[in-house]
Amino acid sequence: MALIAAIDQGTTSTRVCITRTDGKVIAQAQYEHAQHMPQKGWVEHDPMEIWRNTRRALGEALADEDISEQDIDALGVTNQRETAVIWDKKTGKPIYNAIVWQDTRTNHDGDPAKYLRKTGLLHNSYPAAPKWAWILDNVPNARERAENGELLGGTMDTWLIWNLTGGAKDRDKALHLTDVTNASRTLLMDLETLQWDEQLCDDLRIPPQILPEIRPSVGNFGKIRPRGPLAGVPITGVLGDQQAALFGQGGLHENDAKMTYGTGLFMLLNTGETPKVSDNGLLTTVAYQVQGQPPVYAQEGSVAVGGSLIQWLRDQLGILTTAAESETLAAQVDDSGGVVIVPAFSGLFAPRWRPDARGVIVGLTRFVDKRHIARAALEATCLQAREVVCAMGGEPTALKVDGGMTTNDLLMQMQADILGIDVERPANTETTVMGAASAAGMGISLIDEPLSLGTCTTWKSDMAGPERDRLVTAWEDAVSRSLDLV
Ligand SMILES: Nc1ncnc2c1ncn2[C@@H]1O[C@H](COP(=O)(O)OP(=O)(O)OP(=O)(O)O)[C@@H](O)[C@H]1O
Ligand SMILES: [Mg+2]
């Protein structure tokens, strides 16, 4: 039996999935890792914990009684993007925790659009390069050691591939690689040449010695080291998580789009073989590249806070016991009772890009209870998603969705209502890990198109125009109150 394994190294957890070529998932395992928040606005992960969790998840998935390790033909890797790590080449030990994409410590006052044409990104706290520079500037001797070639840098794909192919124990064999999609999130890659740009490395003060080699997403990333799980299996597909979700949704062609509802909200629109720079607050990024073929680009709208608002209601405020309870609570009321939440915890991302914004809850009265707050949280998700869909332009008739929040059927109906178009959810909403598995399977020619996600469920809009306008106006007003708070 032919099988494909994939690792999804996410913001909150690391999962492994083993799938057949017909898209049937036969084993899964998942481990959460700690979120370290040492200061306001800082978010870090321990890369060693993530590597340990990856090995544990692989071991656990492979231990399933239906699986023979010999049947696994390829491994795919997908990962939280922009999260940056630097480690010692000899010991394999990180010199500082990984700085997570949500971390705002590298915010600065310069012109954010300076590198937009070349990289597709804004120069703010989001890309990886400023995070690498922060580590080099703040860990004693790090810059000098980097220049001497003692350190390696990467995003989480690079960290995992280096450890999987050799690590410190087999460091002569360990491969220091990334794929074009992850590289397109650093602020150092030229979107046309798909190579690290010397001028950008200079400007952002990143010694090129620490950077991995950039390879096409569907192609060759070496073989897993001979000891441990999956020995000898080739790594043949690597994509950043949002690109993997687009790939997994079958979004290989121009005008294909998807919205992923995870920790944040991320919409990607495939724009074909030319990078299109947006003046609507969207980013330009590489969607994927198959070895030997031209790259395919995408426009991206990313919203920083999606499911993490639900986590906040659960973990910080304690008004939910589970994320799923957001649905049961919100369903008990017809509206949010006039409450609007703008979850600008770390500023607003696309399409507004306002680092000076902070979260607000407006419209509170004595009448309001936690059911209204839950409903307002779901509305905030839909209204933020709507802004990104509008910024993409065009006249879409349907939106393909996926991610952890989309198990919330009420959210899906509210999204269709607030957009005024159909919302389509595949049976398998784990599109990120399926996208990585698909890329890996295509990389060894085991399959020639992305794996099946099963039959879609569709939600149709059931809201009158004036009601939609009222929600949008109240949202706009609340957003204006969230600005200028830093
Ligand atoms: N029924 C639900 N209703 C609303 N939100 C939910 C529900 N179930 C899960 N969530 C939210 O979905 C998010 C998890 O989704 P998902 O696993 O896709 O996230 P992710 O960003 O991909 O995480 P990671 O980066 O770790 O992979 C959490 O923030 C959680 O609060
Ligand atoms: Mg994810």
Image: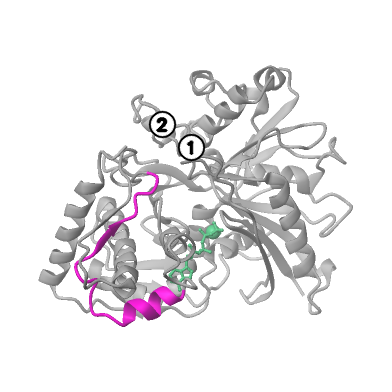
Residue at the image position 66 percent from the left and 27 percent from the top: 210
Vertical placement of residue 59 versus 190, above or below: below
Quick one: quadrant of the N terminus?
Answer: bottom right
Identity, as a three-letter code, of the amino acid under mark 2:
His
| Residue 311 position within the rendered picture, expressed as x and y whole percent measured from the top left | 47, 62
28 lies left or right of 103 = right
Considering every residue shown, the one lying at the far bottom of the view is 332
Q: CA distance from mark 2 to mark 1?
A: 7 Å
In the rendered image, is residue 17 in sight? Answer: no
Q: Which residues are magenta?
A: 324-346
- SS type, badge 1: loop
Badge 2 crowding class, 10 Å Cα cut-off, few under 14, some 14 to 19, many 20 or more, is many
Residue 457: in magenta span: no
Residue at the image position 53 percent from the left and 18 percent from the top: 202
Which of the pair 274/188 is nearer the observer?
188
Q: Which mark is residue 127?
A: 1
| Residue 27 position within the rendered picture, expressed as x and y whole percent measured from the top left | 70, 74
Tell me whether circle 2 and circle 1 mark residues in contact (CB < 8 Å).
yes
Quadrant location of ligand 2?
Answer: bottom right
Residue 228, picture quadrant = bottom right
Q: Which mark is residue 84?
A: none
| Residue 468 position within the rendered picture, expressed as x and y whole percent measured from the top left | 17, 68
| Residue 7 position within the rendered picture, expressed as x and y whole percent measured from the top left | 66, 58
428 lies left or right of 358 = right
Residue 100, picture quadrant = top right
Residue at the image position 82 percent from the left and 34 percent from the top: 91
Quick one: quadrant of the C terminus?
Answer: top left
Identity, as a three-letter code, of the amino acid under mark 1:
Pro
Vertical placement of residue 108 versus 219, above or below: above
In the rendered image, is residue 153 in sight? Answer: yes
- SS type, badge 2: loop
Residue at label 2?
123
